Image (cartoon, helix red, strand yellow):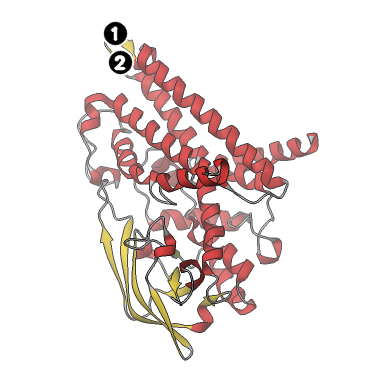
Amino acid sequence: MNDQFAAAHSFRMEVRRFCAGKLPADIKHKVFHNLKLEKDDYVRYLKVLHAHGWAVGHWPREFGGCEWTPLQRFIFEEETTEAGAPWLIPFGVNYVGPIIYTYASQAQKARFLPGIRSSDVWWAQGYSEPGAGSDLAGLRTRAVRQGDHYVVTGQKIWTTYVQWADWIFCLVRTSTEERPQKGISFLLVDMKTPGITIRPIATMDGYHHVNEVFFDEVRVPVENLVGEEGAGWGYGKVLLANERVLVADLGRSTRQLRLLERLARETLRGPRPLAEQPAFAARLAELKLRLHVLRAVCYQAVAEAMEGSAPGAESSLMKLRGSELRQDIAEALVDALGHAGTVFAPEAAAGEGSAPPAGPFDATGILRDHLYGRAATIYGGSNEVQRNIIAKAALGL
């Protein structure tokens, strides 16, 4: 056990050295100030990781990874995010990549994995639909087999950054003759295929994150089906379990909590700093305690994963508590701004124009993060659904 702890500490120090020496300063600045990131920012960061051999560090070596243990992967995610690295856009490296190397044909592995590793190909996730968000078994996008193609018709919604995507992986309905979960397949779709329309959805922070995607008789080669027809529900469940673990987002919450502590020390409320006001000091202490508890739960789940256990209801618990903590820290930050928390200029968060006239430099980014962070309890499976999963799995209800 001591050897395991020593190895984990050594890896943590290695990740910190990487962040200190390799993380681009301009990207780090944007992340620390919660400013808008462009596709180029994400790709540059992924390219830096790729050059270091870490873009797909959790993948098996035979597919270009480092075969990180669950503990190494968790340390990497926590340390890089805390140090100011951007969100590691998961759709390629964390989601579809592992599905491909686990379930796809050798030809599909050879075709798609290199572009995911190098970040030369951008992926999007086509899961949620109107009326079938957290309840994916209700999806209605159809894929009808016609010779050597599937003809796909339907709609996806809340599709993150699909406006930048080269490819999208979709859950589609290939059969209605069995129970809903049995008729779902996992399909890879080239975004250049005729019949695909993207419509942006405006979010409260004023930016273009998510979209509607319409498929109008889109012809997709049968060779783009991953695994077996009708087995997509099982593949999708594996992917969602990974997504919910990542959404605990410890590194981000740690970084934001430090910002809150700094702001509370520097902000006067009457003669004393906000940090010395009893009510706010108690609020800050509660947030710090919740972060410590969440970290303990996450590391317990990692320890179980090291023993070979698959993610269960714990992933729902981590998603639930992590997203709520993120929102509560963001609300405390806005409250700490006082009157400056009433001013938001989207163009300032994008690096355009002048900053808002009131409040500290971070005010723009704090408000932007607060507004977009309202989605954290919805994406990845809404928190209401997570509570149902926990109730069924842990309590037998």
Q: Residue furthest top?
A: 271
Q: What residue appears at the point 25 percent right and 49 percent down from the top-left corner?
A: 206
Q: CA distance from mark 2 to mark 1?
A: 7 Å
Q: What residue appears at the point 35 percent right and 28 percent down from the top-left corner?
A: 332
How crowded is the residue under tag 2: few (<14 C-alpha within 10 Å), some, or many (20+)?
some
Could you tell me the amino acid type at mark 1? Answer: Pro
| Image x and y of residue 262, in percent | 41, 24
Q: Which residue is mark 1?
A: 271
How crowded is the residue under tag 1: few (<14 C-alpha within 10 Å), some, or many (20+)?
few
Left or right for 237, reference 160? right
| Image x and y of residue 194, in percent | 34, 81
Q: What residue appears at the point 33 percent right and 73 percent down from the top-left corner?
A: 154
Please name whichever residue, 153 or 248, is drawn nearer the observer in this view of the structure.
153
Please name whichever residue, 291 or 174, is drawn nearer the observer in this view of the structure.
174
Q: Is residue 337 above or below residue 72?
A: above
Q: What residue appears at the point 52 percent right and 38 percent down from the top-left corner?
A: 250
Q: Which mark is residue 268?
A: 2
| Image x and y of residue 295, in percent | 57, 34
Residue 24 seen: no
Q: Are marks 2 and 1 in contact (CB under 8 Å)?
A: yes
| Image x and y of residue 56, in percent | 60, 57
Q: Residue furthest bottom?
A: 147
Left or right for 332, reference 80? left
Please name whichever residue, 365 or 28, is drawn nearer the observer in this view of the structure.
365
Dot 2 lies on which element? strand
The quarter of the picture where residue 191 lies is: bottom left
Q: Is residue 307 above or below residue 38?
A: above
Left or right for 8, reference 390? right
